[in-house]
Image (cartoon, rainbow, N blue to C red):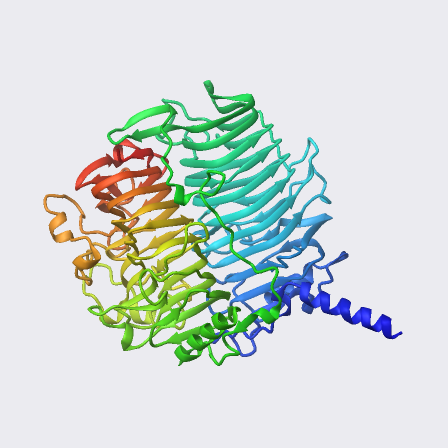
Amino acid sequence: MRFGTLLLAVAGLASAVDAYWMGDIAHRGYAPFAPSGYPVFRNVKDYGAKGDGVTDDTNAINAAITAGNPCNQGCTSSTTTPAVVYFPAGTYLISGSIKPAYFTQLIGDASSPPTLKATANFAGFGLIDANPYYTQNLNWKAVNVFFRQIRNFVIDTRNIPPATAATGIHWPTSQATSLQNIVFNMPTVSNVVHVGLFMEEGSGGFVTDLTFNGGATGASMGNQQFTMRNLKFNNCKTAIYHLWDWGWTYSGLSINNCGIGIDITAGSGKIETGSITVFDSSFTNTPVAISTRWTTTSTPDTAGTLVLENIALTNVPIAVKGPQGTYLSGSTGSTTITAWGNGHKYTPSGPVEFAGAVTPNPRPASLLASNGRYYTRSKPQYETLSASQFISVRASGAKGDAATDDTAAVQNAINTAVAQGKVLYLDYGLYRVTSTILIPPGAKIVGESYATILSADSFFNDMNNPKPVLQVGSYSGQAGTVELSDFIVSTQNAQAGAVLIEWNLASPASSPSGMWDVHTRIGGFVGSQQQVGQCLKTPGNPTVRQGCIVAFMAMHVTKGASGLYMENVWLWTADHDIDDAANTQITLYSGRGLYIESTTGTFWLYGTGSEHHVLYQYQLSSTQNIFMGMIQTETPYFQPTPNALVPFPAVSSLNDPNFSSSCAGVSGNCAAAWGLRVLNSKNILVYGAGLYSFFSDYSTTCSTFAAGQTCQSRIASIEGSASNVNIYGLNTIGAQSMLTRNGVSVAWYADNVNNFPSTVGVYKSG
């Protein structure tokens, strides 16, 4: 009897240790602007879900999602009702769609991902329908769907008859969203019509670590731009079907035993796929790797732009097939495409229309994994840790109410976690800080549902004496590593001197530091005091309201820093009020986006965006060895009223652009924010870029080909010495010159017309 009791006790202890920490940890998340008692964390089993593979859990899961009345049907968007809906291991039988609310994360047990399994009579558009059609329109405007995640699931449609339409996940979405660690299981019979992942609209975005087994189409997708990494397709009729896009970046595709790998033939008349870039990928036992409609006479001129680099083929007879036959032969054995493309190229002059081999990018060894591909690392989920290995910031005394000064409590919690070798858990909250928070080497910080660190008060409000909100490393070049994931850095009220993230750490290239799903959200939400009531847009009025100068810089990577991996990082200054029912536009002034001046470099940027900063979105100065995969930018909507000369004077020590001098002799709207500016740098390798300027003084009439793309004169610049500064898939909107070199236009919008942007397939600096 005692021996049996001991065995049960030991078994219970093992179970407790082996369980995923997210289900065991105490949940103290606090949403200060939600109704009293609002539950941030919800375990679906607490709402009646069984996960036994027999009980219909649809209603219980949706009850967990709708608890507390978050932003659902008819709600435009909201940051006040965050939610994490957690699924312990098990099989959850569902007969209708799971419909996550806005600002909601669906997270399964990372150590044993749960299965969502459809019943035979399943009814709905997607086992997970992340943006339902309650009417003829999507519930949320897809280009404004931000801040959501789905991760750690198996999606199983195999109970649904193969010839009945079925979708695994419906995902029309935009920036600061992610899918991670999901397996789609679909029938493999010949008459199957199931689709794993479907998206038809949006402005994404990032997904990683997805596996598609069976189905008619693994992923059927249309979106402005996306970065997708480590996607595996097994036994699909078609692995990927593009409905439309402007630009798309794929890394680490593995397509096996499919009929067609990537189909970019969509469109009746004109080609709907703007451009795709594929690298470090493999196709195996697939008759046609890529099917395209591009020809030298197809329209628009650069639609269907394709760039391939380091593509391994095994028993793939045709690598690229077009309407005129085989464009690029594969092999019934094994071969590697070093680099090939079609579209327009500038090497460095052009445009030259091409379809053929190109010189692959020389890759710095410091950016590569042992297999010769670019280094990648998925967001850590700490599956091997128990709940006792986490320290709660709210249990450490922080309030997270957007009003209390949480500086000391947050700093003490970070220091304690590092000293004890534990992970700091940022329970959901808005943590108001009035001086710099230091993140020392060794820190590991995980946020709950995008917990927010919110700078405030006069310490951060001197434009002439900028101060970091988060300082990673106490001095430039300090050795060590950190891991940061799933939180936001923001500002409150006027913060003209706030540098939201200052990165000082020098981490080894072999084990770099990482930021995953860490964003800057500057204004436009409750608690920011930078909303419609304070900073409503004023078209036609160039007067700068001092209270709406809200940040000096989003992120600064200093000279001594090195070894940083960034994945799905959005450095956003709000163009509209997310918590306003009409998403009304606002005018906020943030000086600079991402500035990298590291002398050593060694940075990876997968799926990053930087938007609405006054002087530039990305600036790289005297740096090297940087990989960038589908960067995305937008120019502030208010420019040129006022233009980029105000309110931030050019600071020469930061190598700021001096529009007063550089615009001499340039016609049109010259003094406008750069999307990408590269100065005296080498080995800058861009695999996809969407640089957009949609507005002129809040009017979109400038951003069409008919209007002459007159929103701004220039949008990307390479200045000074430039060695191995190369761009694949450069897409621009609203800018007349797509790229300048030392002030001289290299590529002109009208020479590179695509379906909505202008596109250059390959640019080599020479």
Q: Position of residue 757 (x, y in %)?
A: 33, 39
Question: Would residue 390 appear left or right of 689 to someone viewing this image?
Answer: right
Q: Is residue 48 visible?
A: no
Q: Position of residue 18 (x, y in %)?
A: 68, 63
- Quadrant hosting residue 55: bottom right
- Quadrant hosting residue 279: top left
Q: Is residue 699 visible?
A: yes
Q: Position of residue 83 (x, y in %)?
A: 55, 66
**Residue 490 or 223: which is nearer the viewer?**
490
Tell me the quadrant of the picture where the C terminus can be found.
Answer: top left
Specify the farthest residue to the right: 1
**Residue 652 or 272: which is nearer the viewer?**
652
Residue plotted at (28% across, 38% down): 705
Considering only vertical position in the picture, is 294 above or below 68? above
Residue plotted at (56% across, 27% down): 314
Tell me the quadrant of the picture where the N terminus can be found.
Answer: bottom right
Question: Would residue 642 appear left or right of 250 to someone viewing this image?
Answer: left
Question: Would residue 87 appear left or right of 303 to someone viewing this image?
Answer: right
- Quadrant hosting residue 365: top left
Specify the farthest residue to the top: 325
Give the total of numbered labels: 0
Considering only vertical position in the picture, is 347 above or below 587? above
Q: Position of residue 339 (x, y in %)?
A: 41, 29
Residue plotted at (58% across, 30% down): 284
Residue plotted at (53% across, 57% down): 380
Considering only vertical position in the picture, is 733 above or below 386? above
